[in-house]
Amino acid sequence: MCRHAAWLGAPRPLAELIHEPEHGLLRQSYAPRRQRHGTVNADGFGMGWYDPGLATPEPIRYRRSIPMWADANLPGLARVARSGCLLAAVRCATVGMPVEESATAPFTEGRWLLSHNGRVDRDALRDLAEGAESACDSAWLAAAVFRRLRAGCGPTPATATVNALGEALAEVVTGAATKDPDARLNLLACDGVTLAATAWGDTLFHRPHPDGVLVASEPLCDGPGWQAVPDRSLLLATADGLRVQPL
């Protein structure tokens, strides 16, 4: 269910996640190679990025509830939207969940962006999902993570440790999995300087570069360097490097 990808490092255009790689998110929207649940990701797409030239640290977000290949404006936008922190996703909606922009990743609050690949029983999140922008399970997960982040470091991560994002994802994922053992909880989140992701029930890969790191549900190309993240693991990347640890 869904595919997502992110970049943290030297500024790059969004097109390097979407159109330029042979198996970028555009290709993954209609022909994913490693997706374990669902075959087509045509129920919407979205992306977020950070512009250091703006007065606010909040990300810029673009979402649609149509297939990625149906947006004629996207190629031009993806070529000029450039940042050192990028996140993009394509969606295959869980059965029974609404197909609407408010149900499409990335979800955002303050400086945070978040995408979810998987499914979860919303009852596992009922006590944590206040403020969710949609009735879909992914929006409830995002609201739970944002609530945990607010409780730990206020409305923005400006005073938080670099581990705050990873800790929030780990707490929400393990808590939801306790209540819903069949949940699939691959989360991908960032705040402009930190990238965190969980592998829980579906594939996740990372590929280091001299000037940063790519993280994606599946490799964006067949080149060397892609490393699989073990299931039930947390990935945390900053300018100082990347580490993967068990959840």
Image (spheres, grey):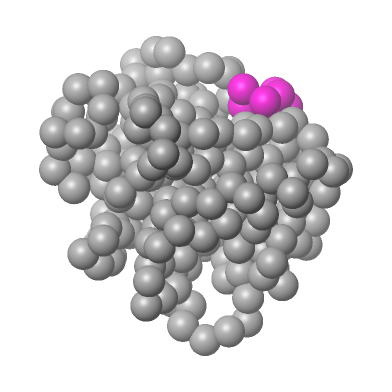
Q: Residue at x 14, y 43 (%)?
A: 161
Q: Residue at x 34, y 41 (%)?
A: 191
Image-quadrant location for residue 98: top right
Above or below: residue 123 compared with residue 2: above
Q: Residue at x 15, y 37 (%)?
A: 160
Q: Residue at x 14, y 33 (%)?
A: 159
Q: Kindly give the residue lying farthest to the top in the view shown.
A: 130
Q: Is residue 101 magenta?
A: yes
Above or below: residue 209 compared with residue 59: below
43 and 120: which is toward the camera? 43
Magenta span main SS = loop
Magenta residues, start to end: 96-103
86 and 37: which is toward the camera? 86
- For the C terminus, the quadrant is bottom left
Image-quadrant location for residue 109: top left
Q: Is residue 134 magenta?
A: no
Give coordinates of residue 119: x percent, y percent: 55, 39
Give coordinates of residue 154: x percent, y percent: 20, 22
- Total residue callouts: 0
